[in-house]
Image (cartoon, helix red, strand yellow):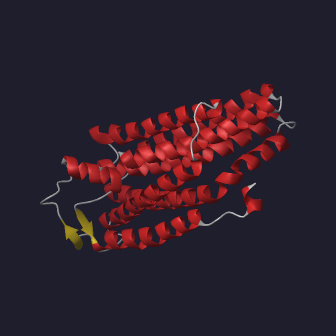
């Protein structure tokens, strides 16, 4: 699924850049002996994220259908909020991220061992926790209930994106390649706004199915006779845009109300010139 691949790629590259900055700064400042602390923090962050993902999956199996839909819908709305925050944060903070991380390393390197471990946990864990929640909601939406034979497809897409991000991060650290990160985060950010709109709209659909919100059978359009949700086109549109052949008026309204202003604000933000003092 393109949406999950983009999530894995973007979040994975952010985490890879964070780790690369931490490692490069420790090596160039003659503090190579502190590297195990960084890797310990990375391992802890990944462990917490994996536990969260597994815990969400196991918990969902024990809930009634209505409760599943309420929990899933609520988490989808939260996940859309995370994506929105992530996109706008990266658009403004990417240029100063390196300086902030180096400052944290200097403040904790000479203190207790757990200090630098905590820096790595917080730096990597933020991306990881966001990714876990977003991927769980996307996987659940792609399969209907988050369980089934098709569950592996969105997960594999996300893992592929993370693997590509890790490879790019390693090559960037080694100086083997150069990427225009501003352009990369601009394009992926715009695509993720569209992905987040689909996640948000489907979250409201879940709440409609749970009976919390009305209008479940009031369709803005119904093209299920032309596009089957189980066919290749329906699967493709579902994976990329969270498109449903039967879209309610509430889903359509939420999608438009989100994507139009958020995409406009994002494009305005990334096109705005950065003051010299903030760019250093």
Whether 83 is drawn above or below 232: the answer is below
What residue do we see at 37% from left, 55% from top?
A: 68
Numbered marks: total: 0
The percent position of residue 186, horizontal first and vertical second, equals: 52, 56
Q: Nearer the viewer, residue 195 or 30?
A: 30
Q: Nearer the viewer, residue 92 or 271?
A: 271
| 121 displayed left or right of 271 | right
Q: Quadrant of the N terminus?
A: top left
Whether 241 is drawn above or below 124: the answer is below
The percent position of residue 138, horizontal first and vertical second, equals: 39, 50
Q: Nearer the viewer, residue 221 or 208?
A: 221
State the image quarter where residue 120 is shown: top right
State the image quarter where residue 88 is shown: bottom right
Which residue in the rendered view is the most extreme toward the right?
110
| 71 displayed left or right of 205 | right
Q: Quadrant of the C terminus?
A: bottom right
Residue 89 appears anywhere in the view: yes
What residue do we see at 72% from left, 57% from top?
A: 279
State the image quarter where residue 48 is shown: top right
């Amino acid at each position: 699924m393109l949406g999950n691949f983009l999530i894995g790629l973007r979040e994975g590259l952010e985490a890879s850049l964070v780790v690369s900055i931490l490692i490069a700064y420790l090596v160039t400042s003659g503090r190579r002996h502190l590297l195990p602390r960084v890797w310990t923090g990375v391992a802890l962050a990944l462990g917490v994220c994996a536990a969260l993902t597994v815990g969400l999956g196991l918990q969902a199996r024990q809930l009634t259908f209505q409760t599943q839909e309420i929990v899933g819908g609520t988490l989808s709305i939260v996940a859309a909020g995370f994506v929105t925050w992530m996109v706008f944060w990266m658009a403004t903070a990417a240029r100063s991220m390196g300086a902030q991380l180096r400052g944290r390393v200097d403040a904790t390197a000479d203190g207790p061992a757990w200090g630098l471990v905590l820096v790595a946990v917080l730096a990597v864990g933020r991306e990881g926790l966001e990714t876990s929640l977003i991927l769980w909601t996307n996987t659940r939406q792609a399969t209907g209930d988050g369980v089934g034979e098709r569950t592996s497809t969105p997960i594999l897409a996300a893992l592929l994106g993370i693997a590509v991000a890790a490879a790019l991060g390693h090559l960037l650290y080694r100086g083997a390649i150069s990427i225009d990160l501003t352009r990369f985060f601009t394009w992926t950010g715009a695509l993720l706004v569209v992905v987040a709109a689909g996640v948000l709209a489907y979250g409201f659909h879940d709440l409609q199915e749970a009976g919390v919100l009305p209008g479940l059978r009031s369709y803005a359009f119904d093209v299920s006779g032309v596009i089957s949700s189980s066919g290749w086109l329906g699967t493709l549109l579902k994976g990329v845009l969270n498109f449903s052949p039967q879209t309610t008026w509430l889903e359509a309204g939420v999608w438009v109300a989100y994507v139009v202003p958020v995409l406009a604000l994002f494009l305005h933000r990334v096109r705005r010139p950065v003051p010299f003092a903030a760019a250093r």
